[in-house]
Image (tube, rainbow, N blue to C red):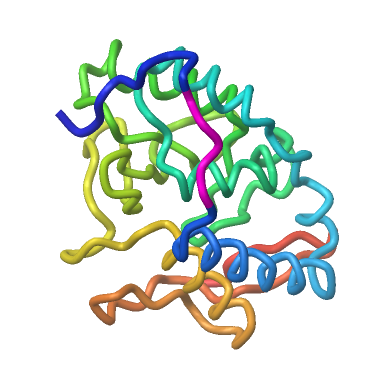
Amino acid sequence: MRGAAPPVGTNTLPVMTENMQRLRQAWGKVEEWLTQNAPGTLGSLRPAATHEEIDQTEHVIGVRVPAVLRQWYRLHDGQEEGYAPDFFPGEFWWFPLEKLREQYLIHTQEWEREVGALPFAADSPDDYAFGLYVEAATASVGTWGVETGHEPLCDEPWPLQDWVSALADALEHGRPVVRPDGTVEAGRPSVDLDGCLTWFK
């Protein structure tokens, strides 16, 4: 089992760890790039989720949200549906918590996948064929698919804060995201006529 059910209603606010600080710093670079280059995508970001909303997510899915993922959602509650859908490499859009909860229950109950892989992005707001998840136990990022199941992005763990750092570096230098094992992902950052980030292949 990937994740354990938390004691509902007993969450304490997380202490700011080095990993959480690393995520905040990397995300600051992402938002700075969006401000200067892709205001359409920046405008698609939702206001921050509250700790209570994240606690409710834990209550619904029965899995503790990793502290670094909690910190990320405390910056923004994903994106608005239908806006700037190609935010992340692979052309994924970022789930609001409501959609994370919905998709997690579909994955674990309807698809009978293992618990603990928290889906946070998909290829389209209208068609969830594949996307990205965060492992509850390790906070590592992986991919999920209707046909392929859940798989890590590379052979070694890729924690969320390092994934966001790689995203920030790719935007800053105008190059594809490079995985920890040296694999270069397809697509360089570009901006469309609406001022939205895309990944040109």
**Percent x, y for residue 18?**
46, 65
**Relative height, residue 74 to residue 9 (above, below):** below
Question: Does 181 lie within the magenta span?
Answer: no
Which quadrant holds residue 126?
top right
Q: Quarter holding the N terminus?
A: top left
Please tell me which residue is depicted at 46% across the width and 31% down the height of the picture.
Answer: 128
Q: Which quadrant of the figure has residue 24? A: bottom right
Q: Left or right of 117: which side holds 12?
A: right
Left or right side of 97 for 30: right
Determine whether, in the image, residue 32 is placed left or right of residue 3. Answer: right
Which residue: 30% across, 20% down?
A: 5
- Does 12 appear in magenta? yes
Residue 173: % across, % down: 60, 88
Give the residue at x 23% y 64%: 154
Q: Residue at x 54, y 55 (%)?
A: 16
Near-viewer residue (66 or 149): 66
Q: Is residue 140 above or below residue 176?
A: above
The residue segment tinted magenta is: 11-15
Q: Position of residue 136 (x, y in %)?
A: 32, 38
Please state which of residues 13 and 45 is positioned toward the viewer in this rendering: 13
Where 147 falls versus 40 (above or below)?
Answer: above
Number of numbered discs: 0
Residue 64 versus residue 2: which sits nearer the camera? Answer: 64
Q: Is residue 167 left or right of residue 52?
A: left
Q: Position of residue 195 (x, y in %)?
A: 83, 63
Q: Is residue 10 above or below residue 186?
A: above
Q: Main secondary structure of the magenta part?
A: loop
